[in-house]
């Protein structure tokens, strides 16, 4: 009796369980990859937070026309050649980042959880959230939570920021968290 030569690739590609498993693996991979890069970014975000805090504490920005951000940017670039992320605009965002979320440090346990969550999403996401939430910490935290829970990339986040999702979902009265 002749042995049939079965092509495993054909069998697997026609198997529904195998296809479902591939989809699951892909979703798991992207989810884990995003969370791993965010955890690494957490250290950088901690630095940005503290730099924003220092900028606010030093009050160098209170003199109109001082060119503080431009000078600090250039000085940091001179001190750490080849390191990126110290443009005047980015330095301003670090200050905004600190000012927006500083009240979390004074509040209770829920605020502590929210504070930790800040360091789990990418910096560019924070910049977009800061732009769209205009000093509204509750709204900003809503989008930080949604980004983390749903693994939103930048484009998805921008799409939701341009809707009234917070107004519809964030303030809805419910018995669920």
Image (spheres, rainbow, N blue to C red):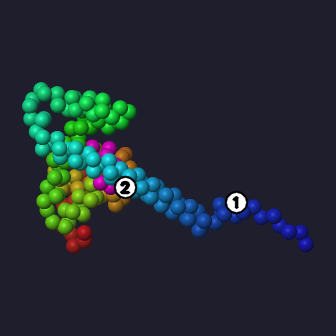
Q: Quick check: 151 above or below 55?
A: below
Who's the residue at 32% across and 37% down the image?
A: 85
Q: Is residue 133 left or right of residue 6?
A: left
Magenta stretch, main secondary structure, is helix
Label 1 sits on a secondary structure element that is helix
The furthest residue to the front? 79
Q: Of the residues under marks 2 and 1, which one precedes in the sequence?
A: 1
Give me the residue at 21% from left, 29% from top: 71
Q: Give coordinates of residue 176: x percent, y percent.
A: 25, 71
What is the x, y in percent for residue 125? 31, 47
Q: Is residue 14 magenta?
A: no
**Residue 25 screen position, x and y as percent:** 52, 61
Residue 9: give its label. Answer: 1
Q: Residue at the spot x=26%, y=37% of the render?
A: 90
- The image quadrant where one finds the C terminus is bottom left
Binning the other alpha carbons within 10 Å of mark 1 as few (below 14), some (14 to 19) or many (20 upward) gives few
Q: Nearer the viewer, residue 89 or 166?
A: 89
Query: What residue is rendered at 59% in x and 68% in y?
Result: 17
In the picture shown, does residue 136 fall above or below 58? below
Q: Which residues are magenta?
A: 119-127
Spatial CA span between label 2 and label 1: 37 Å
Task: Confirm whether residue 167 shows in the render.
Answer: yes
Q: Does 142 sit left or right of 121 as displayed?
A: left
Q: Quadrant of residue 120?
A: bottom left
Residue 27 on image: x %, y %: 48, 59
Residue density around tag 2, few if under 14, some if 14–19, many if 20 or more, within 10 Å:
some
For the N terminus, the image quarter is bottom right
Q: Which mark is residue 128?
A: none
- Where residue 118 sits, quadrant-wise, is bottom left
Residue under pointer 2: 39
Which of discs 2 and 1 lies nearer the camera? The answer is 2
Local secondary structure at mark 2: helix
């Amino acid at each position: 009796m002749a042995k049939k030569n079965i092509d495993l690739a054909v069998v697997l590609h026609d198997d529904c369980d195998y296809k479902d498993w591939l989809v699951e693996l892909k979703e798991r991979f992207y989810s884990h990859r995003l969370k791993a890069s965010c955890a690494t970014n957490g250290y950088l975000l901690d630095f940005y937070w503290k730099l924003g805090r220092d900028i606010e504490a030093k009050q160098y920005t209170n003199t109109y026309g001082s060119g503080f951000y431009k000078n600090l940017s250039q000085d940091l670039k001179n001190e750490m050649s080849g390191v990126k992320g110290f443009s005047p605009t980015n330095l301003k965002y670090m200050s905004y980042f600190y000012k927006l979320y500083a009240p979390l440090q004074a509040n209770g346990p829920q605020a502590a959880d929210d504070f930790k969550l800040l360091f789990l999403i990418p910096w560019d996401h924070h910049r977009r959230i800061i732009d769209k939430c205009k000093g509204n910490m509750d709204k900003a935290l809503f989008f930080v939570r949604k980004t983390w829970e749903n693994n939103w990339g930048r484009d998805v986040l921008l799409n939701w920021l341009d809707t009234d999702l917070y107004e519809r979902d964030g303030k809805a009265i419910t018995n669920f968290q």
